[in-house]
Image: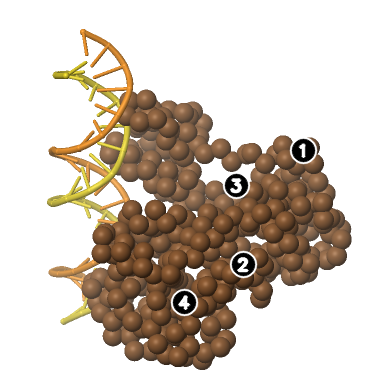
Chain colours: A brown, B yellow, C orange
Amino acid sequence: MIRDARVLRAGFVPSEVEHRDAEVNHLSTVLQPITDGEPADTAVVTGPSGVGKTCISKFVTERLREEVLDVESTYVNCWRNFTRYRTLYQILDDLGQTINIHRQSTPHDELVDRLQQYDGPRAVVILDEVDQLEDPNLIYDLHSLPQFALICIANREQDLFNSVDERLVSRLRASEHVRLERYHDPELYDILGARAKRGLDPDVISDDQLYRIADAAAGDARLAIGMLRSAASRADRESKDTITDSMLLDAAEDARTQIKQKSIDSLTPHQRLVYDIVREQGPLTPSDIYEQYSEQADDPRTARTCRTYLSKMEQYNLIEGDGTSRDRTYSVVDSTKTSDIFETG
DNA sequence: CCTCCACTGGAAAGCTCGGTCT
DNA sequence: AGACCGAGCTTTCCAGTGGAGG
């Protein structure tokens, strides 16, 4: 029943991008100078999650590489590689420049030096979730190197500008800006339809079901494709020929928890304990959380560290803080809102 | 309006771990 | 093997913020 699982995976870049012609063209134009061996301007790509920011950036870069021989490209997820060192290392690694660089004992500055000395072909550097960078000055360093064309991806323009200093803000404001809006339901339906057609046997899923996935995903293509993937793999496991409505219902839950589970898995045991306390007993005040935590933990960390955990988890969108100062409480982020849409449909 | 108190998050120093260098 | 180094995490200290209550 699954014909080509690749097209249902999260990072898949399709051969044609649907409903993003204007944005794709815009981004292509920014990178265009590279085809003539000229330096390209920095591009900023913004929009909420699942609108295709990563997808069109990779797509445009791939297409450029098909056109021109001498172009390298690298993709760094700054959320996973949030330190300056990891990001630089990732870029150098992708460019094949990590010979003689040792993960542990090479100073920061040497990595930047390496990039400055890089004399290979021009390279497109995609920095995904760039607002998550611990030290945004890295953007400035890369921006000033003419052999690299930067694509900075962020959810919100403001998040990006808030975290960087003045000189960089003015430079980024001057650079090309590609804004992506949420998909409308019919657009999402088209995207899902295309993936289903390539990825699944015919008649595995009905048009009506696809439309309901599109509806439930509320403009988020990643979520929608995740739901489709989850439903399809369930049907496959159970050796069914078609996807049933109840599978769709479970898939909606699945797709959301899977995204969350990734974050949860990256927590340390101490962070995990704090998260579990908030999940089971929240909403709780910070002092209550710490009291519980220090009782339950083996060799508990200090309250300050616990605060660092909380703000980290808030960034990961695992928990949310409500209220300010004394009436502040933390609780887990609610992720079960899609059920009713499928129930009535 | 003023003081108290809980909460927040920055800065700097300390620790441990895993790696290199000789 | 032992000295040494940097990253990442933790601790200590503390200034700033904003409700609550006199």
Left or right side of A133 for A241: right
Residue B7 lies, in percent from the top left, at 32, 31
Of residues A155 and A311, the one nearer the viewer is A155
Amino acid type, mark 1: Glu
Left or right side of B9 for A270: right
Q: Nearer the viewer, mark 3 or mark 2?
A: 2
| Residue carrying label 2 | A20
Q: Which image quarter holds the C terminus of chain A?
A: top right
Q: Secondary structure at mark 3?
A: helix
| Residue carrying label 3 | A257
- Label 3 and label 2: CA atoms lie apart by 28 Å
Amino acid type, mark 2: Arg
Disc 3: which chain? A
Q: Nearer the viewer, mark 4 or mark 3?
A: 4
When asked about the image quadrant of residue A344, the answer is: top right
Q: Nearer the viewer, mark 1 or mark 3?
A: 1
The residue lying at 69 percent from left, 46 percent from top is: A216
Disc 2: which chain? A
Crowdedness of circle 1 by 10 Å Cα count: few (<14), some, many (20+)? few
The lab-note entry on whether marks 2 and 4 share a chain reads yes
- Label 4 and label 1: CA atoms lie apart by 46 Å
The first of marks 4 and 1 along the sequence is 4
Residue A1 lies, in percent from the top left, at 82, 64
Q: Secondary structure at mark 4?
A: helix
Label placed on residue A343: 1
| Residue carrying label 4 | A30
The lab-note entry on whether marks 4 and 1 share a chain reads yes
Disc 1: which chain? A
- Label 1 and label 3: CA atoms lie apart by 19 Å
Left or right side of A130 for A242: right
